[in-house]
């Protein structure tokens, strides 16, 4: 018998339940990835993620070839392509991971219709994209947790399987043809410091992280210049690492840092279960606060200054420039720049979320949209009216200004924490810097936000 494994957000061989199930029942397996034109039409295959994806596919193909197989890549509507592949090799089963977004649900529906029509079984597996399936734990009377801490408590008690080893051998039927793998070199406009994608790179990074980074995570995760977080997010986004394996191995390692790190991983799971229950929250307010946000027309100059990292608030500008340069931004900086856009500039969170999705290598509808909503106060934050002050936050999380100087070369000669308030420098020194004056007074921004939210 032959089975097809449709890879989506799970580009790995280790701990892959759909692949394991297929190999358990079929003599031959087709590992398939379909480049869906709908993803392109939605503007989702931006250069940074397209390049990282190309790395992931190349690595997956290389790992399969070492085991006697290969990756089949096709382009076209997913249901049509999967059906064509099953017809070409006489497959009787298709295995894939359960998805969370509206797109993933529609894809699964169409696939089921198409495969039902030709008598092929579709088997959808949980525990692949997240460690705990969305909806597996729910509070009394609701289909999802709307508050993080009670979710964390319940989620932490869920048993997780032992991570599955990568298969030793994969036999792929000759009859199935694919197209050439996309290559990173073929993608233009990639951020200069984009990391290498793929399961092998992800596993190396994770191994180094468990050895050398994890134990100091709790004390250092908010240190902007220290850059002491795991940077595993793109690998988790593409499924090059298994969330079950990451949680299990971190817990097995034990000691300092583990609880804080696993707590962050749980945020990812929390957002997945919110979006699974409320797919419309990727575009609509999860909780309406009556905001009349400023949009592109009303706030064009403010938005452009924010996007380009020239707001005159150094830590905000540093974060926005890191985003373009690396396709990634430190979580503390994401919080700061998002609070600045939505609360200080009072601009619609969707505008910020769209800009992030254009550059973030880990950008996804689940974590991006729901973190933006959290910061904007339309999401699950239990303190939706708090506003982060970029000067105080800069001084606290970048106390000697190293992060700012790294990303804002105009301020490279300003020593120490003074870099967070260039407007306080002596007039002649200030005049020599080619750095803009603050876009607005923080007090004015705060007053506008409080008035808009009815909280004077
Ligand atoms: P670590 O600190 O090492 O954390 C480990 C893992 O936990 C991360 O890799 C990530 O998978 C998960 N994680 C950590 N914090 C969060 C969080 N707040 N929400 C969800 N998962 C989390 N993360 C994305 O993966 N994709 C996004 O598109 C995204 N957009 C964001 C937008 C905004 C406005 C904000 C405030 C946060 C966003 N995040 C997003 C969450 C977080 O900033 C990143 O996951 C984190 O910075 C990645 O770096 P790391 O891997 O070093 O994280």
Image: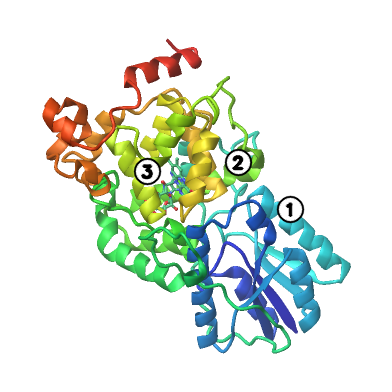
How many numbered discs sit on the rendered protein? 3
**Spatial CA span between label 2 and label 1:** 15 Å
Which residue does the numbered mark 2 point to in the structure image? Answer: 282
The numbered mark at residue 320 is 3
Instruction: Give the residue at the far top of this rendering.
Output: 456
> Upstream in the sequence, badge 2 or badge 1?
1
User: Can you give x and y, in whole percent of width and height, for residue 342 in the image?
Assistant: 46, 29
Q: Residues within 10 Å of mark 3 (few under 14, many from 20)?
A: many
**In the image, is 141 to the left or to the right of 112?**
left
**In the image, is 244 to the left or to the right of 78?**
left
Task: Identify the residue at horizontal 30%, vertical 31% (top origin).
Answer: 390
User: Can you give x and y, in whole percent of width and height, for residue 279 in the image?
Assistant: 65, 42
Label 1 residue SS: helix
Marks 3,2: beta carbons within 8 A: no
Q: Mark 2 CB in 8 Å range of ligand 1?
A: no
Residue 370 visible in the current orientation: yes
Q: 431 or 305, which is in the foreground?
A: 431
> Is the residue 26 above or below the residue 320 in the image?
below
Residue 129 found in image quarter: bottom right
Task: Identify the residue at horizontal 29%, vertical 52% (top origin).
Answer: 257
Q: Mark 1 CB in 8 Å range of ligand 1?
A: no
**Spatial CA span between label 1 and label 3:** 34 Å
Q: Residues within 10 Å of mark 1 (few under 14, many from 20)?
A: few
Residue 369 found in image quarter: top right
Image quarter of the C terminus: top left
User: Can you give x and y, in whole percent of width and height, for residue 106 in the image?
Assistant: 73, 53
Which residue does the numbered mark 1 point to in the structure image? Answer: 106
């Amino acid at each position: 018998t032959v089975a097809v494994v449709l890879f989506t957000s799970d580009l790995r061989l280790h701990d892959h339940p759909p692949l394991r199930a297929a190999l358990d029942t079929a003599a031959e397996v087709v590992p398939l990835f379909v480049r869906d034109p709908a993803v392109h039409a939605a503007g989702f295959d931006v250069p940074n993620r397209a390049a990282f994806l190309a790395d992931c596919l190349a690595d997956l193909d290389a790992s399969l070839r070492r085991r006697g197989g290969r990756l089949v890549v096709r382009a076209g509507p997913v249901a049509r392509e999967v059906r064509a592949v099953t017809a070409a090799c006489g497959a009787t089963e298709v295995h894939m991971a359960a998805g969370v977004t509206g797109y993933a649900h529609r894809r699964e529906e169409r696939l089921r219709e198409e495969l039902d029509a030709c008598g092929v079984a579709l088997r959808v597996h949980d525990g692949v994209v997240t460690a705990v399936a969305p909806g597996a734990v729910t509070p009394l009377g609701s289909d999802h947790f709307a508050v993080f801490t009670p979710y964390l408590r319940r989620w932490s008690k869920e048993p997780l399987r032992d991570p599955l080893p990568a298969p030793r051998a994969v036999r792929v039927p000759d009859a199935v043809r694919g197209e050439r793998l996309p290559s990173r070199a073929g993608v233009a406009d990639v951020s200069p410091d984009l990391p290498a994608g793929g399961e092998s790179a992800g596993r190396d990074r994770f191994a180094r992280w468990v050895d050398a980074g994890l134990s100091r995570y709790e004390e250092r995760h908010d240190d902007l210049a220290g850059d002491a977080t795991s940077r595993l997010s793109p690998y988790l986004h593409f499924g090059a690492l298994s969330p079950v394996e990451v949680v299990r191995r971190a817990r097995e390692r034990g000691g300092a840092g583990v609880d804080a790190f696993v707590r962050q991983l749980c945020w990812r799971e929390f957002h997945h279960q919110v979006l699974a229950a409320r797919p419309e929250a990727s575009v609509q307010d999860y909780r309406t606060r009556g905001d009349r946000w400023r949009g592109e027309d009303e706030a064009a100059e403010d938005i452009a200054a924010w996007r380009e990292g020239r707001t005159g608030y150094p830590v905000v500008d540093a974060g926005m420039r890191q985003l373009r340069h690396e396709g990634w931004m430190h979580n503390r900086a994401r919080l700061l720049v998002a609070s600045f856009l939505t609360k200080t500039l009072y601009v619609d969170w969707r505008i910020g979320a769209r800009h992030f999705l254009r550059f973030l290598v880990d950008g996804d509808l689940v974590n991006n949209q729901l973190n933006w909503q959290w910061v904007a106060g339309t999401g699950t934050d239990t303190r939706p009216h708090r506003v982060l002050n970029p000067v105080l936050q800069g001084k606290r999380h970048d106390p000697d200004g190293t992060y700012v100087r790294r990303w804002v070369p105009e301020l490279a000669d300003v020593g120490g924490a003074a870099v967070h308030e260039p407007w306080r420098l002596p007039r002649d020194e200030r005049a020599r810097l080619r750095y803009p004056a603050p876009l607005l007074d923080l007090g004015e921004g705060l007053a506008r936000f409080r008035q808009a939210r009815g909280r004077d």
